[in-house]
Amino acid sequence: MEVFKVNRNIAQLIVLQRIELIGPILKKLRKLFGRYIYSNFLSKYFINVSEISNKYYLLMENEYKYIDSFLKNGQNILSVGAGVGGLELLIYQKKKNIRLTFIEKNYISKKIVYGWDDKNNEAYNDLNLLEKFLLKNNMGNESFQIFDFDKNDLPNKKFDLIISLYSLDFHYNFELYKSYFQKVSTQETVIIFDTIRPDYFHTIFEEVKIIKKDSNTLHKSKRIACKCFKN
């Protein structure tokens, strides 16, 4: 079976981003000892690195299936809140001449924020580990760029596809990126993200298609593919 190459630090970051990958014992320990002990100790020393790698690969492979029909060779893709970039790595491996741009925050939140807000104060990433993960799995330096949302000017170019799974409008309001997405989109750009309010986006886009329904998340979200901003 194909797997991702990860070290312990990357595996720890993965389980902080994707808590569904940890086993029942670790979930009980997390509940018993609290978030601080879990984030700084349990999530690093009580995980099986190869098992996390396998589970994460399978999870990303499943996510890939939902967006496969929107992917083409040679695309310029923007990813917002990608975690360590497993989905984007699969896209790079399966399609030719893909160019990837990541917009991320570079810290681990000390407090869990449920639902979304207008400030985007929650984050679970380390941009050095994101870069290490991509390079460790043979993504070429020339194929990707990483931008720190809080420090860097955001890229000013057109994208064919914008992806933000369980980030945009799941943890923070879509309006935070709306004007920027309008600037970097064309009439043909597809924007894929998860939301609890899919009907709202009919007021923003000409085309809105539900491509996944998730009843297991806290807010029972839907994944939508949107196209063409309304004037």
Image (cartoon, rainbow, N blue to C red):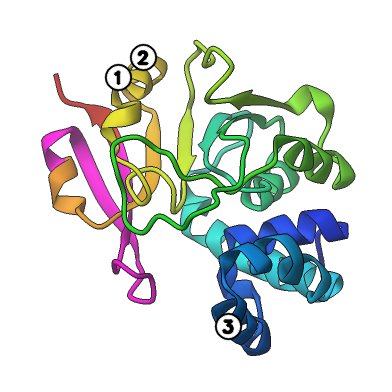
Check disc 2 and report the residue beneath it. Answer: 183
Is residue 67 depicted above or below 55 in this figure?
A: above
Q: Amino acid at mark 3?
A: Leu
Mark 3 and mark 2 lie on one chain; the one further toward the N terminus is: 3
Is any atom of residue 1 visible in this view?
A: no
Q: Which residue is mark 3?
A: 32
Q: Residue at x 14, y 42 (%)?
A: 202
Residue 6 x, y percent position in the rendering = 84, 57
The amino acid on which the numbered mark 1 sits, given as a three-letter code, is: Ser
What is the secondary structure assignment of the residue under circle 3? Answer: helix
Q: Is 109 left or right of 119, judged from the image as shown? A: right
Q: Are marks 2 and 1 in contact (CB under 8 Å)?
A: yes
Q: Residue at x 49, y 55 (%)?
A: 111
Task: Give above or below for 110 relative to 18.
Answer: above
Q: Dot 2 lies on which element?
A: helix
In the image, is residue 209 part of the stretch drawn in magenta?
Answer: yes
Q: Nearer the viewer, residue 150 or 204?
A: 150
**Magenta residue check for 221:** yes
Q: Which mark is residue 179?
A: 1
Q: Amino acid at mark 2?
A: Lys
Q: Mark 3 to mark 2: distance in Å? A: 47 Å
Q: SS class of the residue under badge 1?
A: helix
Q: Quadrant of residue 206?
A: top left
**Residue placed at 61% from the left, 77% from the top?**
33
Identify the disc placed on residue 96: none
Q: Earlier in the sequence, mark 1 or mark 3?
A: 3
User: Which one is closest to the eye, mark 1 or mark 3?
Assistant: 3
- Quadrant location of residue 210? bottom left
